[in-house]
Amino acid sequence: MTVSIESLLKETRVFPPDEEFSTHAHIRSMEQYQALYDKSIQDPEAFWTEMAQALHWFAPPRDILVEDPPHARWFVGGTTNLAYNCLDRHLPTLRRNKAAILWEGEPGETRILTYHQLHREVCRFANVLRKLGVRAGDRVAIYMGMVPEIAVAMLACARIGAVHTVIFGGFAAEAVRDRINDAKASLVVTCDGAFRRGQVIPLKPVVDAALGQCPTVRHTVVFRRTGDRINMEPGRDHYWHEVIEAVTASAPPLPVEAEHPLFILYTSGTTGKPKGVVHTTGGYMVSTYLTTKYVFDLRETDTYFCTADVGWITGHSYVVYGPLSNGATVVMYEGAPNFPDAGRLWQLCERHGVTIFYTAPTAIRAFMRWGEQWPMKADLSSLRLLGTVGEPINPEAWMWYQRVIGNARCPVVDTWWQTETGAIMISPLPGATPTKPGSATLPFFGIEAEVVRKDGTRCEDNEGGFLVIKRPWPSMLRTIFGDDERFKKQYFADIPGVYFTGDGARRDEDGYFWLMGRVDDVLNVSGHRLGTAEIESALVSHRTVAEAAVVGRPDELKGQSLVAFVTLRPGNPATPAAKHELAEHVAAEIGRFARPDVIRFTDVLPKTRSGKIMRRLLKEIAGGSETKGDVTTLEDLSVLAALRASQEEE
Ligand code: PRX
C-alpha cells in the first residue's frame, strides 16, 4: 500500500438509457434507483427483509444482520436451500419445462436441460454423493470442463449441504493438489477430459497426479466427456454414468442455516498461498438473485449467456446461482471463443437467440483484434443488453462493444466486483443509469462504497485513492478457509473499520466510480487474478533458480502481461532454452494461463536495505519507462543499470 495513485483518464461521453428500454425495465429511472438505494442504506432491515421474501425459506430469518466486526452474519435464524431455490421453486410454475441450460459443446453438439430435467439430474447426483459418504459440511472438489454436469455437481452439493470447491480446469496438478488439501476435500468430481480449441485437455490424469498427495480424498466421480482412455482405480474412482444408474431421482433438499457454508473458491493473494474465500448460503443467494434480476434487467423470455468459466466466481454467481435462482435460460458453451473460427460466439448468439451477453474486457479486446467481419456475419438482433466484468475496460473497447456488438442500441453494464464480494457491487442499472464508457458508475443497493486516502479520509472528487466498502453486505466473504487471521489482516487491517478491496479508484463529480486496477502485488491477466508470489514460488521451485520477482506490464490484449526477473543459481547458463524451460515449468506448476510472457535473467534484484524486492522499480523497467521516484532505499544503485542492460539484450 505504498503506491500513490494518479488518475489521468478523463472521459466525457455520456449515454442516457434508451427510453424504450427504460419503459419495460425493472428500474426505470434514476429517481427509482435513488429511492431504493436510499432505503437500502437508511433502513437495511426493511429493505433486505423485503428482498429476501422473493426466495424460499424453510424458516424465515429472525435477524437480518448480526455484526461482530469484521465478521457479519446475515439472515440469522433463517433456513433455506439454494438448490431448492434454483430448481424446486420453479417446478410448480410455467418454468417447469423451460430450458434451464442450453449447452453447446465445442465440437458442435447441443444439449437442453429443462428445469424439470435439471432437477432430476441434481437429485440423482445428490444421492450419489450421499451414497459415497458425503455429509453436510464435507468438502467436494470439482475439477471439470464446461459441461452441464459441472452445474449439476455444484447444485447437488448445495442440495445436501456439502461445500463445493470448484478448481478451474486450467490448473495443473500441483495447484489442484494444494487446493484439495487446503479444503480437505473427501471427494473429487472430474471429467476424463475437455475439448478446447479442437484438442482434448486431459483432466482425470491431472487429478491422478494430484491424488498421490491428497490423503483426505476417498472417492472420485468421473464424467465421461471425451471418451479417452483413462486410469480408473477400483474402489476409489467411479464413472458418473454408472453410479447415477444405481440411485433414484428423488432427494429431499436439506434445509440449512443461512450461514451454512456454500462454497470455497480459491483466489490469488499477495502471499504465495491462494486464499480459500468462503461464501455462505443465505446472503450469497439473496445478492446473486437480486443483482442478476436488476443489473441484467432479467425477463422471463430472456436467453442469457455469460461466457465465464464456472471455475471462476463469475461462473458461480452469473452462470449458475444468480440466473437459475431467477428461473432464467442460461447458455453454456464448452470451448474456445475462436474455434473453429473467430465467429463462434456470434454464431452461438444467433443460433440460441441470446438476449443478454456478459463477457470480459480481455475477450472484447480479442474480438476487436479479430475484426468486425465476424460479428457482422451473424444476426445479433436478438441481443438487448451487454455486460462486462473482470478488469477496467478502456473506453475504446467499451465503445466498440456498444457499437459493433450492441449495434448502438444495447445498454452496456460495466460491473465491478470480486471473488470476495460474491456479487456485483458497482454497476449501472440499464433502464436507469446514464453510462460513461470506462466507468462502472454507481453502487448497487445496500453497497456503501467510498474512495479514501491511506489514512481513511475521504478523497475529493476525482482524486485517486483506495476503494473501500463501508458496511457489510449479504454476499461478502465470511472468512478465509482455515485462516481467519489472514481474513482480518488482508481486508480490514490497512484501513480501519472498512473492507479494503485492493483496488484503486476515483469518484467523479457525479458520484461515478472509475476503477484503476490493483494497488497490491496481485496481477490481472486476461481477467484472471494472479498473485505474483504464487508465480515466484513456482519459478523458485525450479532447480536452476535462486530468486525471482514477477511484475505486470500493460498489455493491449491481456490487460497485463507477466514479466519475470530471474536470478539463476551459479553454473546455470542464461540461455533462450533456459527461459523456455522456466516458462514451461510455471505452466506445469500452476497452469498455462500463468506462464510468464517475458523472462529476464539478472545477476541481482533491486532490494531495499532490509532485503525487500523493490517491485516498483522492476515494474518501471519492465514497462520500459524511466525509473522515477525515490531510490534512496535501494541498497545498491548499480543494480539498476544492470537491469536495464538486461532489457536491452532482449
Ligand atoms: O481489480 C478488480 C478487477 O478484478 C478484481 C477481482 O478479480 P476476481 O476476484 O478474479 O473477480 C473477477 C470477476 C468478478 C477486482 O479487484 N475487476 C473486476 N471487475 C472490474 C474490475 N476492474 C474494473 N472494472 C470492473 N468492472
Image: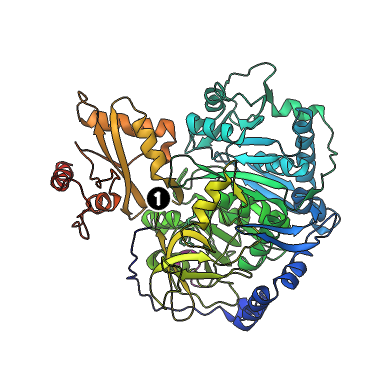
Asked if residue 405 lies in the magenta stretch, the reply is yes
Q: Is mark 1 within 8 Å of ligand 1?
A: no
Q: Give the range drawn in magenta.
A: 404-408
Q: Is residue 180 left or right of residue 507?
A: right
Element at label 1: strand
Query: What is the x, y in percent for residue 287?
Result: 66, 61
Residue with the most extreme bottom position: 31
Looking at the image, which residue sits at the far front?
Answer: 610
Q: Quadrant of residue 122?
A: top right
Look at the image and tell me whether residue 111 can be seen: yes
Q: Does the magenta stretch include residue 569?
A: no
Decide which of 421, 351 is in the foreground and name it. 421
Whole-percent x and y of residue 45? 73, 70
Query: Local crowd at mark 1 within 10 Å, few (<14), some, or many (≥20)?
Result: many
At x 63%, y 19%, the residue is 232
What kind of residue is marked 1? Leu
How many numbered markers are drawn? 1
Placement of 451 over or under 150, stated as above or below: below
Q: Which of 202 and 611 is in front in this view?
A: 611
Residue 189 horizontal side relative to residue 368, left or right: right
Residue identifier under label 1: 523
Please determine whether, in this image, residue 328 is positioned above or below residue 180: below
The quadrant holding residue 21 is bottom right
Q: Which residue shows up at 57% across the image and 24% down it? A: 211
Q: Position of residue 517 (x, y in %)?
A: 41, 60
